[in-house]
Image (cartoon, rainbow, N blue to C red):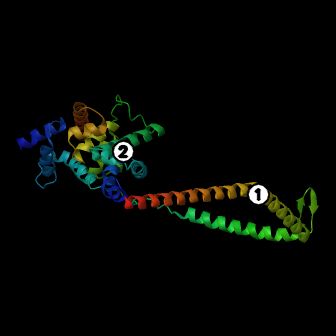
Amino acid sequence: MKKINNLIDLYFEGKTTIAQEQELKKYFTSQNINSEHKIYQQLFETFETEKKEKYPENLPKMKTRKIHKKPFKTLIILTAVAASILLIIGIFQTDSYDSYVIINGRRINDKELALQMVQAKINKISKSLESDMKPLKNIDNKLRERLKTLQKTGTIKNKIQHTLDKINIKL
Amino acid sequence: MNTRQFNNKILKFADKTYRLAKSILRDENKAQDAVQDLNLKLWEKRNDLDKIENITGFILRSMRNLCLDRLRQKHIENELSNDLEYKEYDPHLQLEKKDMATQAAILINRLPELQRTIIRMRDVEGFELNEIAEITSLTENAVRVNLSRARQKIRTQLLTK
């Protein structure tokens, strides 16, 4: 009894340890509480009640949002679709509009005529290139002749060597 | 800290943080909101939570700070003043609340915020003085003094009833 009184005094002075407070809580939740201590019983009961209080709901569990890598795929598909549409529009537009080419400052609407003129231009360029290539061909031919001469020199050299070898054998 | 670790380690503090928030805000709905807001804040910082040594202390301190911000914002009452006078026990409330345990809860709720937080940290949650000091950002001695004052006020009220 004296011990409990002492503990109660220490408790209200804020001088009790956790273990001593446990002892007090045990006493106040028992059936053997002294009448003069009944006044404090409600306080310890309140602590016990509050200790059991829980968060009223289940907290939603946290989730990480999955990052879908679809945008890149979608981009490709959209680009392909856009390209197809542009191609179709382009095809129809070439038919619907009056197409032409400008050659030597002349506007030519006739497709056949335009092709013939382009062909003629290409032939002209080709001939021009051929004539321009002639000096180069001449250089090439001369180089080939020089090479042949050099090859002949090599053959003569071999023959001399062969002759010398023969002389050595005789000696 | 990954999602699974967060859900296992952090969400288990919900009951403790709820009790603390309810004690400070003295409102169940506001306490629930505070718990949810705290969880979102912690979720945003989940990558840094592994570096914290005392996660319990950190979470409860964060909860208290969040609640104190709410009190400041809404000017519920002059809770933060250290000079706040203890209000006399209202006998009308006694009539309304016949349950003895509830009367004691009312007495605790009438304490200034710091004192009711400390008394509940100690007597409900069972924290050591140094742990309460960390949660409340006070010295251990300041916690002891406030705990003693809180208990003595309660005793006086119970004896004069």
Answer yes or no: is residue A44 visible.
Answer: yes
Camera-side residue of B86 and A142: A142
Give the chain letter at badge 2: B
Secondary structure beneath label 2: helix
Picture coordinates of residue A143 (x, y %)?
Answer: 65, 55
Q: Is residue B14 left or right of residue A146?
A: left
Picture coordinates of residue A48 (x, y %)?
Answer: 23, 52
Picture coordinates of residue B69 (x, y %)?
Answer: 43, 39
Q: Which residue is mark 1?
A: A134
Query: Which corner quadrant of the image does residue B106 belong to?
Result: top left
Give the chain letter at badge 1: A
Residue at image coords 51%, 57%: A157
Quadrant, the C terminus of chain B: top left
- Amino acid at dot 2: Met
Q: Which mark is residue B69?
A: none
The correct choice, above or below, for A66 with respect to A2 in the image is below
- Amino acid at dot 1: Lys
Q: Which residue is mark 2?
A: B63
